[in-house]
Image: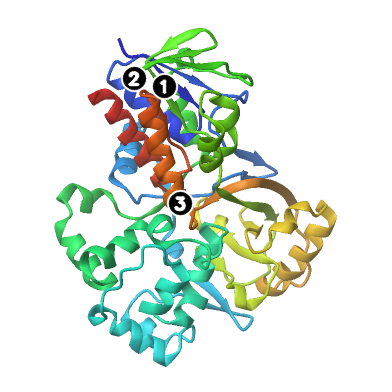
């Protein structure tokens, strides 16, 4: 009889457990911390709702849309205000809205006239065949350098805390890669894929930004309730995992037919001593971006009009911060009535040394940028919290192909072991949920 051990009670592990439970398959989730949810943590303080990890989700997959429906009897998502559709990009010290249609695309000062014509001709451009091409190379080739500098680069900084010159399109942005690989063009592919999608997909995958009334932690708290505390073991700092034979494992002396790992690569070496040094060396060769998140709350806001999702800052602007999310503009009750609440990000791959700065030095240069960009007379935040994530976001670089091949070989060598989590399949909330649902289906079908 199947019995599954899931390592990690983050979003991936909890979602996998939920669908195994619905199928009647016994499982145990082992979590090293005293709480579930992984990096998703929310807290209410001084009238502000603080996110200590991810701030929002996007309904970008059918699996995520279905999960939100599944949990709606416990936790109902709150969708971002219409203003969140507006995204700001900094150029020459001024904020400009990212184009959302043909008219704004023609008039925007973000891109050069040459690149605007290049984007217009992307439909007819010859297909490339560059499996190891970086995102920067892909974008320059098909859309132009100004599009890379003032659209893709700030987006990558804001989402990946990464560098488009390091990230490989095929692995970091597989949907984008497949548009060209399968259809020959981003525009042509987008049109054809939209026609091929099911009515359910078109209805439910609305790309809306969401959170919950008291923060994103409501998502993992609801999952925890659905999974059941009897299936979760917390404070599991030391796990003795042994491979006994195909589909036979021992975890602290208890037998399981399958093990699903949802942890970062750094934990794999200590968790699975039966994987040899060469295999481990390949598996752990994954770069993680360090990220520092500052939660800033103002009881009375005197700065710029906050009619947007937030602002992203291109590398060319040479600023200390990567971006600012206007959280109190997106969701209700995030700040006092006349106030405002922000999540400010710094560090990342390009400024990785900032993670080592003491709080006072870090706050000094962040405050300087924030005051100028948000046009406030003085930096007088009523709430300041600093959250450091030394290994925050996986970076899918040129080593991705070798790592994925090694994962497949290790899973073949040790039947019943499934290596999931952020070493593969994407870093977003929708990516994690999609991977978890597919993992559960695979276990159910076996």
Of all residues, the one furthest to the bottom in this rendering is 113
Is the residue under label 2 in contact with that under label 1 (CB below 8 Å)? yes
User: Can residue 307 be seen by looking at this rendering?
Assistant: no
User: Can residue 446 be seen by looking at this rendering?
Assistant: yes
Q: Seen in the image, is 71 located left or right of residue 252?
A: left
Q: Viewer-proximal residue, 117 or 218?
A: 117
The image position of residue 363, as x and y in percent, is 78, 58
Q: Viewer-proximal residue, 18 or 282?
A: 282
In the image, what residue occupies the spot 69% across and 60% down?
300
In the image, what residue occupies the spot 30% across and 54% down?
206
**Which residue was labeled with disc 2?**
21
The quarter holding residue 122 reads bottom left
Of the two numbered discs 1 and 2 on the same chain, state the one appearing first in sequence: 2
Of the two numbered discs 3 and 2 on the same chain, state the one appearing first in sequence: 2
**Image vertical order of residue 63 relative to residue 221, above or below:** below
Q: Which mark is residue 76?
A: none
The quadrant the N terminus occupies is top left
Secondary element at image label 2:
helix
Q: Seen in the image, is 206 located left or right of residue 421?
A: left
In the image, what residue occupies the spot 22% across and 71% down?
188
Distance CA(mark 3)–CA(mark 2): 32 Å
Of the two numbered discs 1 and 3 on the same chain, state the one appearing first in sequence: 1
The image position of residue 382, as x and y in percent, is 75, 53
Q: Which mark is residue 227?
A: 1
| Total tally of numbered discs in the picture | 3
**Image vertical order of residue 196 relative to residue 186, above or below:** above
Assess disc 1: are there few (<14), some (14-19) or many (≥20) residues with their C-alpha within 10 Å of its C-alpha: many
**Which residue was labeled with disc 3?**
400
**Image vertical order of residue 262 relative to residue 186, above or below:** above
């Amino acid at each position: 009889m199947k019995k599954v051990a899931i390592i990690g009670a983050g979003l991936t592990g909890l979602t996998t457990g939920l669908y195994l439970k619905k199928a009647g398959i016994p499982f145990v989730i082992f979590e090293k911390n005293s709480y579930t949810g992984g990096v998703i943590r929310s807290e209410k303080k001084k009238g502000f709702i603080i996110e200590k990890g991810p701030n929002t989700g996007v309904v970008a997959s059918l699996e995520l849309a279905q999960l939100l429906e599944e949990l709606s009897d416990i936790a109902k998502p709150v969708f971002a205000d219409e203003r969140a559709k507006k995204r700001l990009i900094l150029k020459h010290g001024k904020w400009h809205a990212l184009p959302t249609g043909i008219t704004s695309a023609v008039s925007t000062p973000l891109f050069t006239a040459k690149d605007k014509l290049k984007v217009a001709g992307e439909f007819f451009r010859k297909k490339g065949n560059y499996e190891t091409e970086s995102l920067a190379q892909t974008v320059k080739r098909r859309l132009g350098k100004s599009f890379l500098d003032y659209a893709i680069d700030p987006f990558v900084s804001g989402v990946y805390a990464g560098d488009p010159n390091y990230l490989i399109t095929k692995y970091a942005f597989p949907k984008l890669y497949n548009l060209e690989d399968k259809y020959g063009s981003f525009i042509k592919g987008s049109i054809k894929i939209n026609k091929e999608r099911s009515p359910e997909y078109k209805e439910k995958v609305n790309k809306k930004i969401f959170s919950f009334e008291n923060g994103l932690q409501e998502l993992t708290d609801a999952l925890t309730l659905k999974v059941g505390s009897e299936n979760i073991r917390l404070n599991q700092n030391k796990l003795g995992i042994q491979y006994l034979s195909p589909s036979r494992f021992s975890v602290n002396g208890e037998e399981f037919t399958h093990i699903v790992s949802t942890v970062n690569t750094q934990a794999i070496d200590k968790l699975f001593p039966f994987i040899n040094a060469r295999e481990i060396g390949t598996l752990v060769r994954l770069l993680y971006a360090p990220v520092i998140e500052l939660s800033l709350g103002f009881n009375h806001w005197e700065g710029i009009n906050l009619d947007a999702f937030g602002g992203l800052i291109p590398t060319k602007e040479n600023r200390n911060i990567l971006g600012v999310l206007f959280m109190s503009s997106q969701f209700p009750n995030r700040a006092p009535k006349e106030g405002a609440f922000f999540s400010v990000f710094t560090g990342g791959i390009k400024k990785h040394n900032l993670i080592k700065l003491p709080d006072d030095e870090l706050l000094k240069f962040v405050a300087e940028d924030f005051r100028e960009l948000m046009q406030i007379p003085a930096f007088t935040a009523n709430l300041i919290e600093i959250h450091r994530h030394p290994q925050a976001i996986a970076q899918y670089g040129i080593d991705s192909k070798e790592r994925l091949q090694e994962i497949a070989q290790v899973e073949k060598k040790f039947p019943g072991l499934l290596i999931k989590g952020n070493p593969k399949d994407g870093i977003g909330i929708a990516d994690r949920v999609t991977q978890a649902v597919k993992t559960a289906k695979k276990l159910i079908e076996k």
